Image (spheres, rainbow, N blue to C red):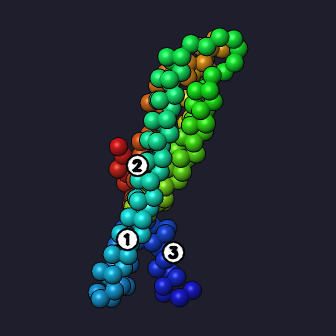
C-alpha cells in the first residue's frame, strides 16, 4: 500500500481531524494547509447536501400542515377519504424519505467531523426506536404514538483513542 492510500485509510478510520493530527508529522508543511482545506471543502459539501434535505423536509411538513388545515375545515359525507388525506399521505411518505436521507448525511458528518465510533453510535440509536415503540404499546394494547420518551435516546458521544469519552 502506498503512502497516500495509507493516509486515506487513517483519515477514514480515525475521522478527518483526529486522522490529520495523527498524520501531522508525516505531512510536509506545504501540503498540510491544502489537505486541511480539502477536508473542509469535502465536509462542507455534505453540509450543503444536509441543508437541501432540510428544505425538502420543511416543504413536506408545510404541505402536511396545509392539508391538515384544509381537511380540518372541510365537511364531507360518506365513507370516502377526502382528497386532503391522500395528499397528506403522499407528503408524509416524502417526509419519511427525506428524513432518512438526512440521517445518512448526519451519519456521514459524524464519521468525518467526529469519529467513526460516533457515527456508529448514531446508527445504534436507531435501534432504540424499537424500545420506544414497545414502551408506547405497553398500555393494554393501546398505542400512544404521540407520547415522547427522550430517555431512550442518547444524543451522542465521542470515544477518544485513550478510551475517554465526551458525551452530550
Cα separation between marks 3 and 1: 19 Å
Cα separation between marks 3 and 2: 22 Å
Say left or right for 44 vs 129.
Answer: left
Question: Residue 132: x and y, percent?
Answer: 55, 29
- Residue at image x 52%, y 28%? 67
Dots 1, 2 in contact, CB < 8 A: no
Quick one: 87 or 97, which is closer to the camera? 87
Question: Residue 74: x and y, percent?
Answer: 54, 16
Dots 3, 2 in contact, CB < 8 A: no
| In this view, the mark in front (1 or 2) | 1
- Spot the residue most to the right: 79
Say left or right for 16 vs 137.
Answer: left
Residue of label 3: 9
Task: Tell me, yes or no, if residue 39 can be seen here.
Answer: yes
Marker disc for residue 41:
1
Number of residues whose C-alpha sits closer than 10 Å to that of mark 2, classed few (under 14), some (14–19) or many (20 or more): some
Dots 3, 1 in contact, CB < 8 A: no
Relative to 42, does residue 100 appear above or below in the rendering?
Answer: above
- Residue at image x 37%, y 71%? 41
Task: Tell me, yes or no, if residue 125 can be seen here.
Answer: no
Quarter of the C terminus within the rendering: top left
> Mark 3 or 2 closer to N-term?
3
Cα separation between marks 1 and 2: 24 Å
Quarter of the N terminus within the rendering: bottom right
For mark 1, give the secondary structure.
helix
For mark 2, give the secondary structure.
strand
Relative to 91, does residue 55 appear above or below in the rendering?
Answer: below
For mark 3, give the secondary structure.
helix
Marker disc for residue 157:
2
| In this view, the mark in front (3 or 1) | 1
> Mark 1 or 2 closer to N-term?
1
Question: Residue 20: x and y, percent?
Answer: 37, 74
Amino acid at each position: 500500500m502506498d503512502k497516500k492510500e495509507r493516509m486515506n485509510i487513517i483519515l477514514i478510520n480515525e475521522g478527518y481531524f483526529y486522522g490529520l493530527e495523527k498524520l501531522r508529522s508525516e505531512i510536509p508543511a506545504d501540503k498540510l494547509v491544502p489537505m486541511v482545506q480539502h477536508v473542509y471543502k469535502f465536509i462542507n459539501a455534505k453540509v450543503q447536501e444536509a441543508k437541501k434535505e432540510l428544505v425538502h423536509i420543511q416543504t413536506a411538513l408545510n404541505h402536511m400542515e396545509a392539508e391538515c388545515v384544509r381537511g380540518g375545515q372541510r365537511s364531507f359525507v360518506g365513507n370516502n377519504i377526502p382528497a386532503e388525506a391522500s395528499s397528506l399521505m403522499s407528503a408524509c411518505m416524502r417526509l419519511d424519505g427525506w428524513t432518512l436521507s438526512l440521517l445518512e448525511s448526519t451519519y456521514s458528518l459524524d464519521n468525518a467531523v467526529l469519529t467513526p465510533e460516533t457515527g456508529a453510535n448514531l446508527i445504534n440509536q436507531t435501534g432504540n426506536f424499537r424500545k420506544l415503540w414497545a414502551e408506547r404499546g405497553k398500555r393494554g394494547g393501546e398505542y400512544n404514538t404521540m407520547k415522547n420518551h427522550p430517555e431512550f435516546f442518547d444524543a451522542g458521544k465521542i470515544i477518544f483513542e485513550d478510551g475517554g469519552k465526551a458525551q452530550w
